[in-house]
Amino acid sequence: MGGEITVVLAEDQTMVLGAFAELLDAQPDISVVASVTTGGEALEAVRLHGPHVLLADIEMPGWSGLDVAQRLHEQRSAVRVVIVTTFARSGYLRRAMDAGVFGYVLKDSPIGDLVDAIRRVRAGERVVAPELAVTAWEGGDPLTERERELLRAVTEGATNADIAEELCLAEGTVRNYVSTALAKLGARNRAEAANMARQRGWL
């Protein structure tokens, strides 16, 4: 597929963002049309510029790169998302694939790998870091969406009563969900369960 590949960059570390922009703009067939630092700005930049590729970090203020990918997927956006991250976690990769992401590249990969991934994604291929390709579908996420929702709230310091009020559930129902999540993860308490799930990329 010929022509210039337009790219929006979304990365909350400004030094990394600047380095990516400089390296990609140096390519004869790639043009960075916007550089942003939050998930919300990434969505707006995609809306404004209609790029071929969105290159996004996972952990950003507000919406994560995975949240952005999911929203674009739901909107049936034509932009192809490439996640670039330090997290070599199969849980994150599975969520990315479920959100319609075309590429998943690790930050410690050579810049040539990232450039190659952008070109291949533009051509319609899916690209996954070799370190994750073999284990991507092993040890699947055992949590339901409701259990993940509750554990995310736990990571933000919410009590069972807080969660019950926020989700319009009985406090006993929240306790039951949390107990089930603890059993699935083999965790001793709410905080440990939330931390385990987060470390595995399930939240």
Image: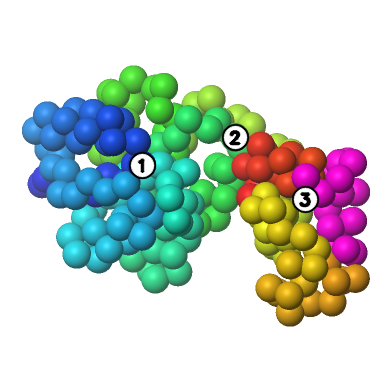
Image location (x, y in percent) of residue 55: 32, 44
Helix, strand or loop for disc 3: loop
**Magenta stretch secondary structure, dominant:** helix
Q: How crowded is mark 2: few (under 14 residues within 10 Å), some or many (20 or more)?
A: some
**Residue 99 as seen in the image, left or right of residue 36:** right
Q: Earlier in the sequence, mark 1 or mark 3?
A: 1
Separation (CA) of disc 1 from disc 3: 30 Å
> Left of 131 or right of it: where is 14?
left
How dense is the environment of label 3, judged by Cα within 10 Å: few (below 14), some, or many (20 and up)? Answer: few
In the image, 181 versus 162, the foreground residue is: 162
Whether residue 184 appears in magenta in the rendering, the answer is yes
Cβ atoms under marks 2 and 3 closer than 8 Å: no
Colour scheme employed for the rendering of this structure: rainbow
Magenta stretch: includes residue 170 = no
Range of magenta residues: 175-191
* Mark linked to residue 12: 1
Residue under the image location 64 percent in, 32 percent down: 135
Q: What element carries label 2?
A: loop
| Residue nearest the viewer, comparing 91 with 151 | 151
Residue 142, which numbered label? 3
Q: What residue type is labelled 1?
A: Asp
Q: What residue type is labelled 2?
A: Arg
